[in-house]
Image: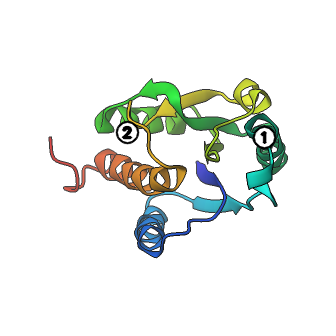
Amino acid sequence: MKVLLLMVGKTSEKWLHEGIESYFGRLNHYLPFEARVLPDIKNAGKIKPEALKKMEGEAILKTIDKSDSLILLDEGGKQFSSRNFAGFMEKQMLAGTRSLVFVIGGAWGFSEEVYNRSNSRISLSKMTFSHQMVRLIFAEQLYRAMTILKNEPYHHD
């Protein structure tokens, strides 16, 4: 199973970028993994949030294939423990999912069209994180899930 992480906009903080890249590098040991940044919309600060979400949504939908399983990282999604998230990943693998696409949207979230296309939504916490922080947190949790599935000593209960 191939995993793609789509992210709207670049990571601006160097320390975040370094942490994110560290986990991205580790993930390739476990599965085919790709991270792709969708460019920021030009003059985004001058665009109303609903219009911006629609523009970002169009970019997201252009990037994915019809056969991709689309999982949104969204505050309204299902919450998992780390072990349960590992179980979710295992189910995807056993179900024969060929391409699993996780999406971290922009600061305003997702358009209705993206919500309608999605197969599932996952929340990392009831707390709100910046969309840039979510990149690091999710990368670590995906790595943790892979080590759990391989019975490696990274995760402790």
In the foreground, 73 or 24: 73
Q: Spot the residue most to the left.
A: 157
As drawn, 115 above or below 52? above
- Name the quadrant containing residue 84: top left
According to the picture, the residue beneath numbered tag 1 turns out to be 48
In the foreground, 115 or 152: 115
Query: Which quadrant: the C terminus?
Result: top left
Q: Is residue 77 left or right of residue 120?
A: left
In the foreground, 62 or 98: 62
In the rendered image, residue 107, in percent from the top left (x then y), is placed at 61, 46
In the rendered image, residue 88, in percent from the top left (x then y), is placed at 44, 32
Residue at 41 percent across and 73 percent down: it is 15
Q: Secondary structure at mark 1?
A: loop
Q: Nearer the viewer, mark 1 or mark 2?
A: 1
In the foreground, 139 or 15: 15
> What amino acid type should be assigned to the residue bearing mark 1?
Lys
Does the CB distance between marks 1 and 2 fall below 8 Å? Answer: no
Q: Is residue 82 left or right of residue 54?
A: left
Q: Secondary structure at mark 2?
A: helix
Residue at 72 percent across and 40 percent down: it is 68
> What amino acid type should be assigned to the residue bearing mark 2?
Ala
Q: Is disc 1 surrounded by few (<14), some (14 to 19) or many (20+) residues within 10 Å?
A: few
According to the picture, the residue beneath numbered tag 2 turns out to be 86
Q: Is residue 46 left or right of residue 21?
A: right
Q: What's the coloring here?
A: rainbow
Residue at 62 percent across and 45 percent down: it is 103
As drawn, 149 above or below 114? below
